[in-house]
Image (tube, rainbow, N blue to C red):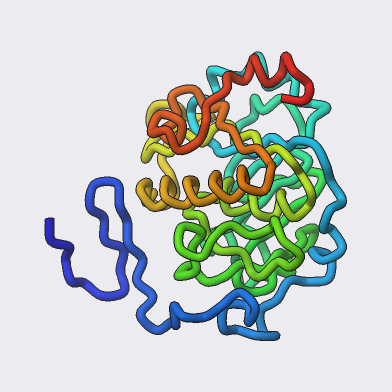
Amino acid sequence: MLLPTHKKEQVIVQDRAIRLWPWLDNQCVPEDNWGFGDTLQQPEWVAKAKGTKDGRVFIFGTGPSLATQLPLLHRLKNEDTWTVNRMAQWEELPFTPTYHSITEPGPVGNWGLYIHKIYDFPKATQRIAIHWFPVRAEGWLWCAKAHDDVQVRWEGWFGLGDSLPPLPTAWASPLTLGQLACWFGYKELIYLGIDTTQTGQAWDVSTGRTAQVRSILSILECADRARCQIEAAGLRIIDCTPGGRLNQEGVLPYVPLEEVLADGSS
């Protein structure tokens, strides 16, 4: 199938979406912060956070499968948890997140001065905005993200080494922020609610929609690259999303949440 030739717009073919950034140089390298040098680098708090955590962290999407796992989610109150985007809309969430993040431009208002309310989670212990210009919203920390032409599927997964450039996008917020979780020192990334569908949310399983159409094939490619590098580093990444596309496609290994919770070390 031939793609339309429209410039600077999102083009969707089945599960693939293409964002065009024709003015950016794809030859830039992480050592130069993807061509931005000192104008885009991680803030001091990120450097200090390296290796400060250990063990496992449960990283959440907002997919409809979470509604079926609600009885089990009550057992995560004493675990490190990381939510994203509009999760505060799900009033049934039975724990207070350790972290809450956004990783896309839509939630950010007035060049970083605020985060749109629907994407905020004020009760979270720590809120982290992962974005390509500094976020100065009250109560939020900022972590630098590369522009969206820099992607995990092409440039690799970061957070496993001695330095952390602006984070490449993994086309899905829970995956993108996983790099920061590795940087913090977590040894196991346990994913939930990453159904990777175009419809359905935890708070509206039948008609809820994503804010933007997902590029599902791009997400799959990024997750595959992530798993390869994470496992090569001796760490673990698993998916506890029942029926989730990432595990159904064989990209991430599936482990039922019941089994993970039965084994405290997962």
For residue 82, above or below residue 103: above
Task: Say which residue appears at 18% left-offset and 71% top-offset.
Answer: 5
The mark tally for this picture is: 0
- Using the rendered image of the protein, determine whether residue 118 is visible from the camera's viewpoint: no
Name the image quarter holding residue 144: bottom right
Q: In the rendering, at what x and y percent does residue 142 appear?
A: 73, 65
Report the front residue among 106 and 162: 162
Q: Split into 4 quadrants, where in the image is the C terminus?
A: top right
Residue 180 is drawn in which quadrant?
bottom right
Eyeballing the image, is 242 above or below 100? above
| Closer to us: 160 or 257 | 160
Residue placed at 76% from the left, 44% from the top?
186
| Image spot of residue 114 (x, y percent) | 67, 64
Residue 2 picture location, percent across and down: 13, 61
Residue in view at x 77 percent, y 34 percent:
96
Tell me the quarter of the image containing the N terminus: bottom left
Which percent across, then down, holds residue 240?
57, 26
Q: Indicate left or right for 187 with 197 as reference.
A: right
Q: Is residue 157 above or below residue 196?
A: below
Is 35 in front, or is 45?
Answer: 35
Q: Can residue 249 be seen here? A: yes
Q: Residue furthest left?
A: 1
Residue for point 63% across, 82% down:
32
Position above or below: 70 against 222: above
